[in-house]
Image (spheres, rainbow, N blue to C red):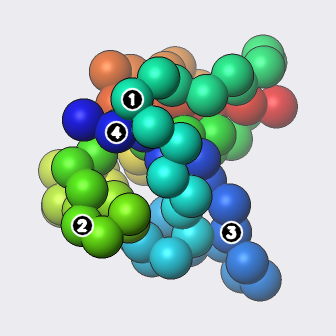
Amino acid sequence: MPWYSFTPIGTPDVSNPNHYTLVGSTPPSCPTPNEQLCAIQASDNMSKPILTDSLIAEIGNTVNNKIESTNVLLKP
């Protein structure tokens, strides 16, 4: 599955596919400390991520706990 950088425009919305930029098959560099959303790994729909309910929940848990997961990377 491809990786997408979180690149919000205006008010950040992790559930909006338009707030992500396709990076490719290699995860982007996300510096520490782990505090906010950096990138996600998701299935692709015309260069935008498919944001399932389970992925949105994984994003929320990862950001709240400040611990990266298989599909979610964090940055400062």
Mark before the other along the chain sequence, 3 or 4: 4
Relative to residue 20, is residue 32 drawn left or right?
right
Disc 2 to disc 3: CB gap under 8 Å: no
Q: Nearer the viewer, residue 26 or 14?
A: 26
**Is the residue 32 above or below the residue 1 in the image?**
above
Residue at the image point whose x is 53% and y is 42% from the top: 23
Q: Amino acid at mark 3?
A: Pro
Residue at the image point whose x is 25% and y is 56% from the top: 44
Disc 1 to disc 4: CB gap under 8 Å: yes
Q: Amino acid at mark 4?
A: Pro
Q: Residue 45: which numbered mark, if any?
A: 2
Q: Nearer the viewer, mark 2 or mark 3?
A: 2
Where is mark 1, residue-wise? 25
- Location of residue 7 by image quarter: bottom right
Picture coordinates of residue 75, whole percent (x, y): 73, 31
Q: Residue 8: which numbered mark, if any?
A: 3
- Distance Cα–Cα, label 1 vs label 2: 15 Å
- Location of residue 13 by image quarter: bottom right
